Image: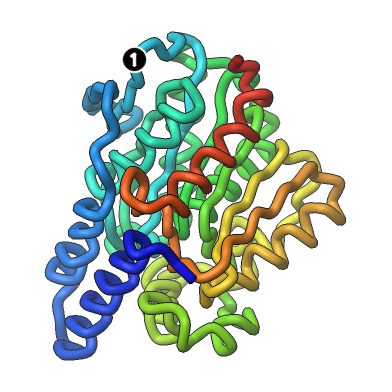
Amino acid sequence: MPSTESAALKAHYQSITDRLAANPEMGLAAMRSIFEELAVQTAEPEDVTYAEVDTQEVRGLWCVPAGAPADKAILYTHGGGFVGNTVHSHRKVAAHLAKATGVRAFVLDYRLAPEHPFPAQIDDAVAAHQWLHAQGFSGANLAVAGDSAGGNLAISSVLKLRDLGEELPAAIVTVSPWLDMELVGKTLESNADNDALISLGVVTMMSQMYLGSDGSATDGLANPLHADLSGIPPLHITVSEAEALLSDSERLTERAGQAGVDVELRTVPDQQHVFTFMAGRAPEADDAIAAAAAWLRPHLAVN
């Protein structure tokens, strides 16, 4: 059974779903505002400071835990179906992971669809990697992490870096990654009654906005399940067994293993999509972040 604290996320997701269903003609700005409310679910981590970045190359937010070394970092790409959420909705989630790992995190403010369809988000994430390298963060001292669509972006941006022949990060961490733009995962149907947020209708709408008129659902950069994953860094995946997108993580694990990638899949029962939103409030979220951080620290040579 889920904890009482984690059950609050399901209730919040259900309120989002109900509001969207009650107003099918809701505009994009209103929908984005509703999804931005998810920030209230995450507890404020202690001993973390924040600094905004707005340069010609990147926009985003540094989350700096007390005592974090100056030369190691996590690049965090937030979820939101490529069409919503911001650094502010995910600031605290990224900060909890940063604090547990013992390094700073940079939450990227990437462009959103449909105003900026695929591959604008990948271009922004690649630019962020390049900017971080220019700031003195070597690939060996850099990890990338992301949830939902941000988990897709964490992987796809590394694939793009690999194809460009550029330095790769030391590791990739994903939570509830949304990868399948074809929307053929079996758990979209079998877990439909368990998942209060993700439905076939929701991901169909978001995938259409993301791909735009020119993107393909089988392009390996839009859908890493169709990519050659060989040569990417070690990969950690956290997902709930109750999620509609569970199949994405299962297929990613299989394909990554077949490509020779060091991959670890951690499944948790009875939780909602990106249940780490409940960091600092629900034990399941805190345990998941602690496990991801414990896996990540050796890859960043953090004691």
Q: Is residue 233 left or right of residue 201?
A: right
Amino acid type of the residue that numbered disc 1 sits on in the rendered structure:
Ala
* Above or below, 31 relative to 38: below
In this rendering, is residue 117 above or below 136? below
| Residue at x 41%, y 41% (from the top left corner) | 124
Q: From the viewer's perspective, is residue 83 above or below residue 63? A: below
For the point 34% across and 72% down, which residue is it?
Answer: 10
**Residue 113 appears anywhere in the view:** no
Image location of residue 202, percent across then percent down: 38, 80
**Could you tell whether 263 is left or right of 245 in the image?**
right
What residue is rendered at 64% in x and 72% in y?
247
* Nearer to us in this view, 13 or 214: 13
Q: Which residue is drawn at the image coordinates 65% and 45% (left, top)?
A: 236
Q: Would residue 80 be found to the left or right of residue 161 on screen?
A: left
Give the quarter of the image for residue 225: bottom right
- Examine the rendered structure and indicate whether residue 267 appears above or below residue 1: above
Q: Is residue 21 left or right of residue 181?
A: left
Q: How would you rate the neighbour count of disc 1 (Cα within 10 Å): few for under 14, some for 14-19, many for 20 or more?
A: some
Percent position (x, y) of residue 98?
A: 43, 29
Label count reads 1
Tell me residue 194's x, y (percent).
Answer: 47, 82
226 and 169: which one is in front? 169
Q: Secondary structure at mark 1?
A: loop
Say if residue 29 shows up in the picture: yes
Percent x, y for residue 156? 58, 50
Residue at label 1? 66
